[in-house]
Image: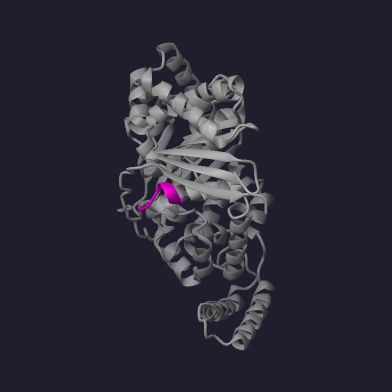
Amino acid sequence: MTAIIHNPFRFFLLVGALLGGLVVAGPNAAWATDDALQNKVQQFTLDNGLTLLVAERHDSPTFTAYMTIGVGSVDEVADNRGVAHLLEHMRFKGTRRIGTRDFTAEQPLLDQIGQTARILDQLRHDPHADPAQQARLQEQLKTLQHQQRALVVKDEFSQIYARNGGVGFNAFTGKDLTSYLISLPANKLELWMSLEADRMQNTVLREFYTERDVVQEERRRSYESRPSGMMYEALLSTAFRVHPYRHPVIGWSSDIENLTREQTADFLHRYYAPVNTVIAIVGDVDTQQTLDYVQQYFGSIPAGDKIPPVTAVEPQQRGERRCNVRFDAEPQLLVAFHKPTLPSRDDYAFDLISQMLTEGPTSQLYRSLVLDQQLATHVSSYSAPGARYDNLFILSLTPRSPHTTAELEQALYQELEQLKQQPIAPQELTRIAKRLRAERLRYLRTNDGLANMLTRFQVVAGDWRYLVDYDQQIATLTGEDLQQAAKRWFNEENRTVITLVQEKP
């Protein structure tokens, strides 16, 4: 039910591949324009700081709700890395009235489990600990968890939503934010408000230590035994030396192992609160009624603490950095360059550069490296790992046997040099910009796509109207702008290279 999103900002480059085609059609086609967005999206701010965005669309008797909290792994510190992702798991476990058969009976068991697990965690880090004492406490913890399990109603949130026609009940955590989402019949709007307000105020961290083990296993499965996960972690920890973007969303293994219920509860109660929350409701709803429900269910919740900005600034990279990852898998290559994030003009330029280099069979790198020279089987590009702070432009390539990653890397640099030496022709720039716009509008005409982007840019850019201004900014870019951006950032001293070296066990 959960997903970690390394690069949630990348939707402009992904939706073409996900949805297929470029024709903007359907009931919301005319609606999904900049003027319509400006006029149809209504914004409200409650006294406690919660932001509500409402967009009425009456073509289907449903709505999509996104609740996005501007809290991600970038907001963690050394002693609680991984807490945002673990909390995403924990907030599906229920509240004082959901997910339990008798919370009055469950509460003392939760306290005993917490106390026993804390002592066990301390003993695990004590080289002089008594193994017999550890064994007794481990057995005691199992007994308490078994007793508590008898009082738990598994997945009750999911069950309630499913009984009421809900689809797509899910969540994801990224570097910059955490989102919870679902689509429901239009007459279930008040149900959503009631359940989510309860979840904001009364989340219970039940089954905390078993879920911590689940996350640890997720880390082993997705990052420590998969070449793509290993390479991505190596890239971020090599390219970033200071900024917390260098840490994985899921946390390092030792981080997860040492997270406590008290740390997690503190992070939850301080930050998962109205002042850091944006709600988007898109679909067959009435704006005034939606606002009334939000005020009724969320208006009395305390504001919470505003997430402080990250003060760490990544120093300018002054030399190429390289790292080899050894694993029994086909060779791969990641090449990354530091770049500014929005609202920098270069950030817009890189959206077009990515389209030009790798999007589709007519893109520059696909034609040259995959079709003509047959050096690669796969090329792609994207910006990561987040967008609230300066990030990376990443190129991912897979060599075609018998060619090596070294051959492919040199061929890539020759292609990038062409972009630096000669500006893109105006007609080609126009074609790329039209494709980017078509992909964007196609995504925004879905309720899910619009709700996602409204909350995302309200958090990341500080204003959802970034969506309205986007095409206007893209239209002002010239071939020379792209060329200058390439010259500024595509250089050796700004480059980080991760190579997957095949090594048999």
Residue, x 54% and y 31% (percent of image)? 408
- Residue 439 or 228: which is nearer the viewer? 228
Q: How many marks?
A: 0
Residue 336 locus on image (x, y percent)? 44, 39
Residue 270 locus on image (x, y percent)? 39, 62
Residue 54 locus on image (x, y percent)? 46, 39
Residue, x 36% and y 58% (percent of image)? 303
Camera sees residue 492: yes
- Residue 238 belongs to the span the image colors magenta: yes
Camera sees residue 341: no
- Residue 415 or 265: which is nearer the viewer? 415
Quick check: 41 above or below 151? above
Quick check: 15 above or below 155? above
Residue, x 55% and y 49% (percent of image)? 325
Q: Quadrant of residue 473 in the image?
A: top left
- Residue 18 belongs to the span the image colors magenta: no
Residue 341 locus on image (x, y percent)? 36, 38
| Boundaries of the magenta span | 237-242
Snapshot colouring: one colour
- Residue 5 or 228: which is nearer the viewer? 228
In the rendered structure, the answer to whether residue 166 lies left or right of residue 406 reads right
Residue, x 67% and y 55% (percent of image)? 159
- Residue 231 or 446: which is nearer the viewer? 231
